[in-house]
Image (spheres, rainbow, N blue to C red):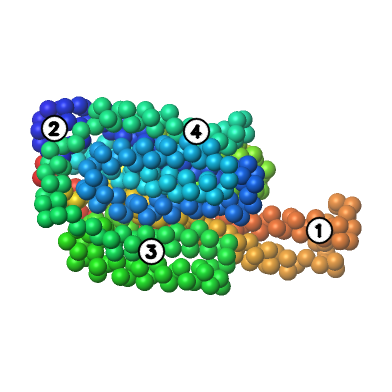
Amino acid sequence: MAEVRAALPRSAAGPYNPWLIAAIISIASFMEILDTTIANVALRHIAGGLAAGLDESTWILTSYLISNAVILPVSGWLSNMIGRKRFYMGCVAIFTVSSLMCALSTSLAEMIFFRVLQGAGGGGLAPTEQSMLADSFPPEKRAQAFALYALTIVVAPTIGPVIGGYLTDNLSWHWIFLINVPFGLLSLLLVWIFVCEPEALKEDRRKLMEGGLVVDWLGFLLVAIGLGALQVVLDRGEIDDFFAAPNITFLAILFVVCIGALIPWEWRHPQPAVDVRLFANRSYAATNLAMLLFGFILISTTQLLPQLTQQLMGYDATTAGLTLALGGFAAMFVVPIAGLSGRLIQPKYLIIFGFLGESIALFNLTTIDLQMSFWSVAWARVLQAVFLPFLFVSITGASYIGVPPDKTNEASATVNLMRNLGGSMGVSAATTMLAWQTQFHHARLGESVSFLSRHFQDFEHQTKLHGTTALRSIASALQGQATVESYLDIFWLWGMGAALVWPIALLIGRMPKGATARGV
């Protein structure tokens, strides 16, 4: 192990075992990613506790996602300016304190304010952690390191609804925030003791400061406004009927203008807030696109499955969350396999395997019906979950191929932004499609229903219901069937998409074997 550390001057492990550091920095990441889904099932309870309407309460989720999206792309620059360890501990501290304040909030305005702070603190965690892992392990061992880290990415959003449902049903909604406090304090203590700031990073910071601190204020502004506008469009678009609403149209145009101005500005800036020049690397650009698609599939299906079981099968929040839990446990067992596979097989081939496997699993979800048992639904999720670690571990490890060692902070930030944006896009697309397809199927199924149809008369005879009472009963059944078919349409479309996107992986370069830390 001493030889590994000697070859890695940017390692966050210092004199300690890198695997110890990997375990320590996973604590805060697990806590932050858990928070992206744990509040979903408790939203009605939070709204009631804060005397807010359910529509207003969605800003509790949106505010977190917006601030998280704004901080993610600039976290690499902030880490370089402040110092990686100092920046990371600051993010953990902000996330922990704001979690406590969320639990103590007495109004919707207070809750939204502290959720913005919580999202800002959480946004800097994952990129910094992945940068530490990339710098602490040589390329040929990164797959195993990221396999350990994958437990947080794949498992946390899966068990979030389960924990959120249990805490809400048995204690109160306050505990979905209070649970972060002890883990945050533990993370701060362990990072302070064991995580090191290597001399190479200190030297990079000194060089960066030699000509004076150049703050890319315009870059920050364009990122904040552009990504903030995009997040609102994705989160509120379906509710406000997308481009039929002037506010959504304005925000969509604002996003396009800001990102259109950001790219040429950052390309020429000597110290850009977001280093867009990294995308000139074909392999890096391909891994970012693959991560966007990974986030799209993971987060949207994590919402769709428990939503289906609650809406149509009568499950409560805890039971609905448990349909995901078995998949989470399955992913935990597969993660080490994905890590070991990365030592033997090039990432591009594992990514192809992951996307094709996801396609099969998503097609399998189209067989769900309302008579299925709990275990049948849970096992359908297991089939999907076992392929997710192969995608995450391989994409994350491959994202550093060809990236200069002093750019790992920036590379990590952008990759994590892609995962979060993919998740937001997936949820927005799924919600919109569900509404559209439900209307379509309802109209199609309702064409054959009338007082004079033979099916209607047979239904009256069988149920002993007559006239408008029978018609209302049929309408309710039609609505349920239309909704089921809409969910199945989404699973089929997602499966088809996963089956068609795998060629992206062919653009990813080869992972070097036995390379040193001088560059990959």
Which amino acid type is marked by label 2? Arg
- In contact (CB < 8 Å): disc 1 and disc 3: no
Q: Which residue is mark 3?
A: 226
Badge 2: residue crowd in 10 Å (few <14, some 14–19, many ≥20): many
Q: Would you say residue 213 is visible in this rendering? A: yes
Indicate the position of residue 200 as horizontal and vertical percent values: 12, 41
> Above or below — where is 501 with respect to 343?
below
In the structure shown, which secondary structural element does the residue marked by tag 3 occupy? helix
- In contact (CB < 8 Å): disc 1 and disc 4: no
Q: Earlier in the sequence, mark 4 or mark 3?
A: 4
Q: Real-space Cα distance between discs 1 and 3?
A: 47 Å
Which amino acid type is marked by label 3? Gly
Q: Earlier in the sequence, mark 3 or mark 2?
A: 2
Q: Which residue is mark 4?
A: 178
Q: Which residue is mark 2?
A: 5
Badge 1: residue crowd in 10 Å (few <14, some 14–19, many ≥20): few
Q: Which residue is mark 1?
A: 472
